Amino acid sequence: MDNKIMFMKRLRGLREGQELTYRDLASIVNISYQALHHYEIGDRDPSVWAVKKVANYFNVSIDWLVGDK
């Protein structure tokens, strides 16, 4: 599975696992909810900054979040 698909699946799983809406998580990590939605469905690639913010919030490594580990 490629990194983009892994990121999409893990992001959605983490968000839904904590019962967060797009708006909730977007507000927490300071990105737009539209951008977050596009990251989850694969329409847009996240910036390194956005991946780092999500990884930090969920206390996971960036490598894990993007499927490298």
Image (cartoon, helix red, strand yellow):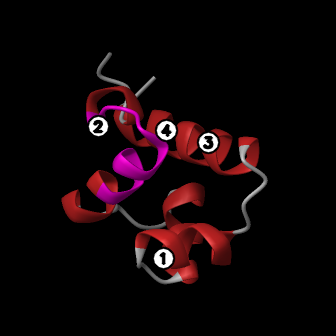
**First in residue order: circle 4 vs circle 1:** 4
Nearest-to-viewer mark from 2 and 4: 2
Residue receiving disc 1: 35
Q: What separation in Å lies between label 3 and label 1 (alpha carbons)?
A: 16 Å
**Magenta region includes residue 21:** no
In the picture, the disc for residue 14 is 3
Q: Nearer the viewer, mark 1 or mark 2?
A: 2
Q: Are marks 3 and 1 in contact (CB under 8 Å)?
A: no
Which residue is at 72% across, 47% downward? 18
Q: Between residue 41 and residue 19, name the one nearer to us.
A: 19
Sequence order check: which comes first, mark 3 or mark 1? 3
Distance of label 1 from label 2 (alpha carbons)? 18 Å
- Magenta stretch mostly in which secondary structure? helix
Which residue shows up at 40% across the image and 35% down it?
65
Task: Check whether the beta carbons of the residues at disc 1 and disc 2 lie within 8 A of each other.
Answer: no
Percent x, y of residue 27? 53, 79
> In terms of depth relative to the viewer, which is nearer, 44 or 63?
63
Tell how many labels: 4
Real-space CA distance between mark 2 and mark 3, rounded to the nearest whole angstrom: 13 Å
* 20 relative to 5, above or below: below
Q: Earlier in the sequence, mark 2 or mark 3?
A: 3
Query: Which portion, as a residue range, is magenta?
Result: 53-62
In the rendered view, tell whether residue 41 sits above or below residue 6. Answer: below
Relative image position of residue 54 (x, y in whole percent): 41, 54
Gap in angstroms between the C-alphas marked 2 and 4: 14 Å
Residue with the mark numbered 2 = 62
Residue type indicated by callout 1: Ala
Residue 67 appears at what percent x and percent y?
Answer: 38, 26
The amino acid sitting under disc 4 is: Ile
Is residue 59 magenta-colored? yes
